[in-house]
Image (cartoon, rainbow, N blue to C red):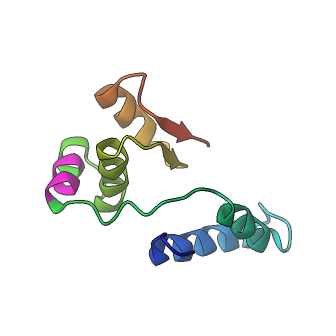
């Protein structure tokens, strides 16, 4: 887990446990997905800037949380994976069809 922000892992544990509790994952599925994530090349891009986060949040009516992920991805030329149905339209309208985003509903 070195090199990755600790908050990310808490978020992922919460997400996968919630999916398991709602029977969207089988018993033990949360642990299995965490192990799969550990094998990915996930990097910590830092906390981002307050100015970038606020500007993006206000411009697109996003939460600071979503705006931070979006502004970090754009500033670093990275893909953004999201389950949020509201982010892909914002990304597409702002950054065009070439925006590097993965959306899965």
In the image shown, does 26 or 47 lie closer to the viewer?
A: 47
- The quarter in which the C terminus is drawn is top right
Q: Main secondary structure of the magenta part?
A: helix
Spot occupied by residue 92 in the image (x, y as percentages of width and height)? 38, 28
Above or below, comparing residue 85 to residue 66 in the picture: above
Q: Residue at x 45, y 34 (%)?
A: 100
Is residue 69 rendered to the left or right of residue 85? left
In this rendering, position of residue 17 left or right of residue 7: right
Image quarter of the N terminus: bottom right
Q: 48 or 55, which lies in front?
A: 48
Residue 52 falls inside the magenta stretch: yes
Q: Measuring from the top left, give residue 93's x and y in whole percent.
A: 33, 27
Residue closest to the eye, 57 or 4: 4
Query: Residue at left 40%, top 32%?
Result: 89
Span shown in magenta: 51-56
Q: From the viewer's perspective, is 7 left or right of 12? A: left
Residue 44 within the segment the image draws in magenta: no
Q: How many marks?
A: 0
In the displayed structure, 95 sits above or below 64; it is above
Identified at 66% across, 66% down, the residue is 38
Q: Residue at position x 19%, y 52% from top?
A: 52
Q: Position of residue 37 (x, y in %)?
A: 66, 62
């Amino acid at each position: 887990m070195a090199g990755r922000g600790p908050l990310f892992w808490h978020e992922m544990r919460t997400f996968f446990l919630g999916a398991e509790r709602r029977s969207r994952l089988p018993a033990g599925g949360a642990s299995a997905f965490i192990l799969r994530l550990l094998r990915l090349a996930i990097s910590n891009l830092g906390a981002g800037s307050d100015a970038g986060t606020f500007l993006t949040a206000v411009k697109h009516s996003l939460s600071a949380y979503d705006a931070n992920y979006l502004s970090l991805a754009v500033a670093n030329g990275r893909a953004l994976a999201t389950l949020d149905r509201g982010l892909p339209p914002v990304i597409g309208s702002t950054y065009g069809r070439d925006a590097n985003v993965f959306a899965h509903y």
